Image (cartoon, rainbow, N blue to C red):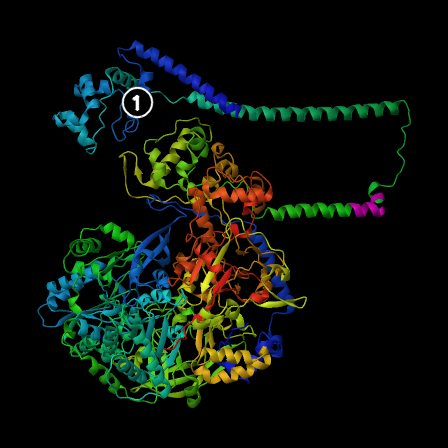
Amino acid sequence: MRQVIHCKLSKNLLGIFLILLLAFSTTLSAQEGDPAKGKTLFNANCAACHQLDKKMTGPALRNVETRLSNDQGLDKAWLYAWIRNSPGLIKSGDAYANKIYNEYNGTAMTAFPQLSDEDLNNILAYTAEVKEEPVATQTTATADTGSDSAISNELILGALGILFLLLASGLYVVNKTLRRFAEAKNIELAETSKRRPLWKAFVQNQFLVLVTAIFLLLSSAYFVYGYLMQIGIDQGYQPVQPIHFSHKIHAGDNAIDCNYCHASARVSKTSGIPSLNVCMNCHKSIYEYKGETSVEYSKEFYDAEIKKLYAAAGWDDAAQQYTGDSKPVKWIRIHNLPDFVYFNHSQHVSVAGIECQTCHGPVQEMEIASQFSSLTMGWCINCHRTTNVKVEDNAYYTKIHEELSKKYGVDKLTAAQMGGLECGKCHY
Amino acid sequence: MSSNKKYWKSVEELNENSSIVETLKQNEFVEEIPTDEFLGDKDSLEASSTSRRDFLKYVGFSTAAATLAACEGPVIKSIPYVVQPEEIIPGIANYYATTIADGYDFASVLVKTREGRPIKIENNTLAATSGNANARVHASVLGLYDSLRVQSPRKNGNSISWDELDTEVVQKLTALKDSGKDIVLFTQTFASPSTSKLIAEFKETYGNVRHVVYDAISESAALDAYQAKYGERGLANYDFSKAMTVVSVGADFLGDWQGGGFDANYSKNRIPQNGKMSRHIQIESNMSLTGANADKRIPLTPNQQKVALAKLYSYVVGGSVSGNLPEVIEDAVKKAASQLKKAGSNGLVVTGIQDVNAQTVALEINEYLNSKAFDKATPIKTRQGSDKEVMTLIADMKAGKVGAIIMSGVNPLYTLPNASDFYEGLKNTELSVAFSMKEDETSSGTQIIAAAPHYLESWGDVEIKKGHYALTQPAIRPLFNTRQFQESLLKWTGNESTYLDYIKEAWGTSILNGSSFNQALHDGMFVGTIATETTDTTEASQNLETPSSGDAARALADSAKSSALELTLYAKTGLGDGQQANNPWLQEFPDPITRTSWDNYLTVSKADADALGLVNTYVSNGALNGSYANVTVNGTTITAPVIIQPGQAKGSVGLAFGYGRTKGLKQEMQTGVNAYALYQGFNNVQEVAIELASGEHEFASVQLQNTLMGRGDIIKETTLEIFNTKDKEHWNAIPTVSLNHQETPVTSPEVDLWDSFDRSIGHHFNLSIDLNACTGCGACVIACHAENNVPVVGKTEVRRSRDMHWLRIDRYYSSEETFEGDIEKKENSEGWFTGTKTALREMESGAENPQVVFQPVMCQHCNHAPCETVCPVAATSHGRQGQNHMAYNRCVGTRYCANNCPYKVRRFNWFLYNGNDEFDYHMNDDLGRMVLNPDVVVRSRGVMEKCSMCIQKTQKTILDAKRDGRLIKDGEFQTACSAACSNGAMVFGDINDKESQVAKLKEDNRMYHLLESVGTKPNVMYQTKVVNTTEA
């Protein structure tokens, strides 16, 4: 955890440094406008349809100003007019405006009359920034720290091992030398008396044999029992999914609410695996991974996974349109309850207001999702015994809570007292 | 047990010398379990290569292998949508209003879908005017997942594309346009305004088009009579809730008479309120569901029924008719007439005699009475077939006058009595197309099978009653490459719009009158005022002469001729006209009267059976065997098994339609005999000759294995008179036990062995079942099947008493001409062992016309449950909310609980029904499994199961309320059975909510618990049956 914070910090510092550097460099160029402010404005207003280096709903915008003036001979005023009122410009019969309009399948650009000259200059300054090369140093750095710690551990162990060997051989040598001394000085070494071997004594002592037998039987029974009891319990089940979906990136780094994707958890018995159109809500514009990476999970790796999503959803990223050729993703279900158990997510999420993490664990930290809880009946029941029912502001509970709390003489009722231990509540 | 009658379940019980009944009283099985037969066979035992040691080795090895295999869990895949539809949330059910209109059953329903799969049919309470979902409608969802459905259009056995089909059909139709030969559309009754319009357009396009409507079970006589009298082709619509005196002559109006759907209103008046309830007199030959519910039932042969109806007319309206009736019957008819007269506009006469005169007479009487129940403004439109036109068509086909025939929703090669004529004619046509879901008898005989969708995959509209419109909408995308009839007509008339758009347009112009189509689609129905013309079916019957009133009655009486034996063909509650014969739920549904599943049979009265030498025998473990009989009508002979039916009119026999199908259904479903072969001239009454045939038929019946064991107070019954005048103690006394030599009611806490839990906090569920309102229709049984994934076990298993129905409807007979006589006899016979015998023997003659009570029995959810205390592993336990829980995963299958249950409601899974080719029903194939309810576990082999009081439904209701943060209103809690019961017999709810209906019913005087004396304190209660014996 600390490491993560550290990484973030260093990344932030690096970012600030880079921005400062760029800001400095841009002031050197003939452009006016603040690219930092421009970035904010760009992300707020333009990013839904434009990227700097990639054609999306609209064209790529890197160096748009210079490109326009060089290639088309259009000045800043044309750009201002286009941004503030592109439909107007198209209607006026402007040749290039119409060309662009038709090139993008007649999708009109939203007009932004509210952007001032200064805003536009800032945005244009941002688009004029030099393309940032992938920060290779950082990835290697993180990779190094990772391997560093691994190496240090091995080194320490190795050193300790060598030390132990040295010590053992030292002792052996000392012993041998002393014996030679004793021999040389004719000191008789005390002869070890011939005693009964230990095992014979053990075998002859029936009490000890009995105790040991009982102990062995009990302990093996313990292990057999332990083995049998874990059959069918898949705690820690972490299958390889057809698409490497990282909950850490989505729910953790980007803090997306669980219910955004698992929307039916609020109303239905199943939490629902999001359909691909939900993924595409965001991934239509998020076509590459920009977060932190490691050797195993590199940017290329994540980008390839996003490509898999595009293939499944039938999204042609280059043409920015659906091909209609979709392939449903066959996810592997992690949390499997037997058919004879009825479980309802909405009861727990909406009515009881339980955090998803209570049962599913720190999903926001899971690079690969796994089963956190044992999902045994004992686990369910323990929770029902200890968890109070959330009765506040729920008219359904008012009367029953009042009556039951009087009956049991308590202020707060557990799910068990509400009847949550009855067989038929979950088995039908 | 003060006011009880003697009840019995099978004729055998009345036989004093029956060793079987005697043995059954002592033992579970009549015969020794045949272990000797197996072990005594030394040769085969010795010849076997598997020794005892080998056997043990195999057992040990397979146990070890199974244990090892169980150590590794399977990898379970989870595949989300690519684009999730907005309205679907996995785990949450969506409901859509739609309408079934398969030509036989018409009803507005709600379809419950989960993840896009229709899994259950429920009543559409918004559309109460459009009939209720009966057992068949509830079961119809399974037809969607029938593995034998035609999956794409076929020509001569090869799959073709719709384009190829269209090209060929249009080409042939165009060629026929000027050939002088007819193009015939031979269809079911659609009762659909849009389809009628579409067919009219089709006629315009091709000119020489004839539309022939065909109902497999004809109501032609009633239609003709109504048309002659009121000038409109429809069926008289009756609102039974407005009738206080009902006289029915041969009309099974609680069954399928005139399309059915009358039971809900009928039941409203059956519950005594303010000392009043309706009086129902039934004159019939077969023991029908309606007769079983009647206050007074008069068994009478069909011909005598005609005389009786004519006499009834003369007594009520006036005039004299010829014909003689036995004195007792004459007297009864006279009394019925005077009661009708007294009731005046509260009276109602209905008849099921398929005779124009009879129907006219019934209409006349109702007119005379000015019956409030007779709703002339809204005739029923769900039967429009005309026998004459069908006959003409067959003749024309044979003569080669028909060039092309396009069929939809009909199966004439199965349902026509002269199917061979039709087949001959079919071969004369140049083009024959059948829209069909199956490769059935008819479609396999045509050139082209146009794969038709299920109604849950189709669009449509229906005018169930005049001015009452309903919409059909798909609840799932077509599973197969199917296209509906109407969609095809649009294609063939060159109309490019979809059928949905076509309906929208048709409704917009002529029905909705400015209302919203989407609202109508949401409601599933729309009550309008403008009637659309359905003229295409009526032309031929325009020139019917109207017989004047008195003439009709006289003609009716004259038409009655005496014959030795008369056969009445009828439709069973389960299979109806036989469309859904491949539906295992309906096959296994026990007939409400005979309690026999998987069969149809000839019902014969005891007297006739004795005369003809027909017998029913009870064998081994109490199963029923019956003789075969050759049934000959006009030279056509079929061989059917015989069941001796108490209450069958002497001189009459009955046989059900819908069985004996041979094509388009699984081997297991090919049960019974085809009664349509005897349906000559579309007349359901035939003169018949019967003789004993060789062989013995094995029936799969339920509820005749055991005796009542003297527990006569299972049913409580009283008369309206006693109910109104005497105290509760007289007719619904609480049983007493002796405590310190004091008679103490069993309900008092002192006699209880157990400490009671405090159930006053939270919910406490109770189910009330009103024996007066229950007609025994069985909709609840099928609803329970669908909701709770109850497996189908098949005929042989049912015969072994291994049926799995969580909810059964027991049928009890009691015999006495008058009720008072019964009580008297009962009171005189002290001690059931000695007394009952003589009393029962005296009743034997009464078995000719027993009274019938239906009693739905499911787990009674006893507060002091005997099953819970004997379970060695505590697999069954009690919840605070009153439900008796069953943890299947904990059950080890000792079956102690079933043995200790006084109500015999626990069911044991003898086999893995969901994965065993021996039980090749819907649960054994992937398509059929789609109907399973994902909220209820599918039980495995070796565990006990039973009614859970639909805990999944109560839990859901509670959760919904918790999530919304609100209290639960009365009526929100429902079980599958109570929701399916449109008769109001089953009321479910929370008795801790003192304002709830069920809490009030618990305090009702009529309330009693089943076997109260056992002290189980059930959470299911019954309301004493009250019979209106008031004679005028």
Percent position of residue B132, x then y:
33, 62
Percent position of residue A5, x then y:
49, 22
Residue stretch rendered in magenta on the structure: A201-211
Check the residue under mark 1 and report the chain it is in: A
* Label 1 sits on residue: A42
Tell me if residue A334 can be seen: no
Residue type pointed to by label 1: Phe
Q: Image quadrant of residue B721? A: bottom left
- The residue at the far left in this view is B178
The overriding secondary structure of the stretch rendered in magenta is helix
User: Does the magenta-highlighted stretch encompass residue A39?
Assistant: no
Q: Image quadrant of residue B877? A: bottom right
Residue closer to the observer: B597 or B1031: B1031
- Which residue does the image show at 26% across and 50% down from the upper left? B519
Tell me if B552 is positioned left or right of B701 in this view. Answer: left
Q: Image quadrant of residue B37? A: bottom right
Residue closer to the observer: A35 or B703: B703
Percent position of residue A7, x then y:
48, 22
Percent position of residue B495, x then y:
15, 56
- Which residue does the image show at 19% across and 26% down from the upper left? A86
Tell me if B927 is positioned left or right of A85 in this view. Answer: right
Task: Give SS at disc 1.
Answer: helix
- Considering only vertical position in the picture, is A230 above or below B330? above
Crowdedness of circle 1 by 10 Å Cα count: few (<14), some, many (20+)?
A: many
Tell me if B17 is positioned left or right of A305 in this view. Answer: right
Tell me if B349 is positioned left or right of A134 in this view. Answer: left
